[in-house]
Image (cartoon, grey):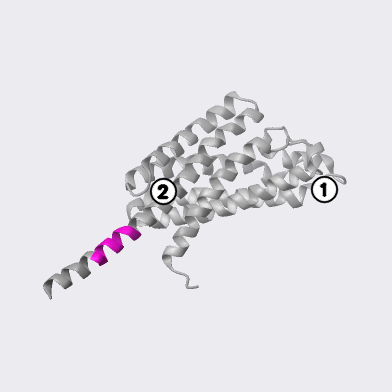
Amino acid sequence: MSITGTTLTRAAAFAAMYAGLAYVAVQFIHPADEIASLSTQPWVNVHILSFTEAVLALVGITGIYLRQVRQFGILGLVSYMMLGFFFILQASFNFAEAFIAPLIAVSAPQLATDFAGLFGRYAAVTDLGALAALPKVGAILYVGGALLFGISIIRARVLSRGAGILMIVAAVITPVAGALLPHALERMAAVPMGLAIAWLGYSLWADLRRNKVDVKLSVDESHIDRAAAV
């Protein structure tokens, strides 16, 4: 099997669709960010799923960006880099939550609790050093990257503008939900983001199919013109 640009674009489209739907699912099954959850299998399973989602989301937005790289311009590049760094950060943190936090839950329960609660809005007792800045850095990359990426999607006019609008809405409501809602409900603000990523993946796949049909029609018309000329 030969690897072509079309194959890679199709893979990126399916990666984005899977990542977006997985991001939605995680919000409904995520255990509480507390010490009692760390040693359970659901905790490990959810964060393995989250790790996979983050990696595939990075693959997906890369394909989405490359499909529109000329139309995206500098704003699109900045938004792609911000979202890309966010998903790298998310993947790294989820890996640690799945495989490292459970190991230290017995010997250093307070450290494990503070680490797992970084994004759960719990006040840390342990001095986490530079790790304490992760929530703010992640929020800037997530909200800013999604907002600019959505704007770039609309401006590019290549993939679904509706998905771009939904991504902007998700970026706007995230800090509002964080300020007004408890953490368990705040998670639901991630649902529109997951749907937007999945929608963009589907739009990329549909665009690929549409272009394939257009190319086939052009080739068929060329053959007809040649036959008529003969």
Residue 178 in sight here:
yes
Residue 99 percent coordinates (x, y): 75, 52
Q: Nearer the viewer, residue 72 or 25?
A: 25
In the image, taking residue 38 as reference, residue 221 lies left or right, namely left
**Residue range of the region highlighted in magenta in the rendering:** 212-220
Q: Nearer the viewer, residue 80 or 13?
A: 13
Q: Nearer the viewer, residue 25 or 184?
A: 25
The kind of residue tagged 1 is Ile
Mark 2 vs mark 1, foreground winner is: 2
The residue under label 2 is 203
Residue 198 percent coordinates (x, y): 50, 45
Residue 128 located within the stretch drawn in magenta = no
Residue 217 located within the stretch drawn in magenta = yes
Q: Dot 2: few (<14), some (14–19), or many (≥20) neighbours within 10 Å?
A: many
**Residue depicted at x 55% and y 32%:** 189
Q: Nearer the viewer, residue 3 or 212?
A: 212
The kind of residue tagged 2 is Ser
Upstream in sequence: badge 2 or badge 1: 1
In the image, taking residue 158 as reference, residue 59 lies left or right, namely right
Q: Dot 1: few (<14), some (14–19), or many (≥20) neighbours within 10 Å?
A: some
Q: Is residue 157 above or below residue 120?
A: below
Give the secondary structure at mark 1.
helix
In the image, taking residue 138 as reference, residue 212 lies left or right, namely left
The residue under label 1 is 104
In this view, which residue lies farthest toward the bottom? 230
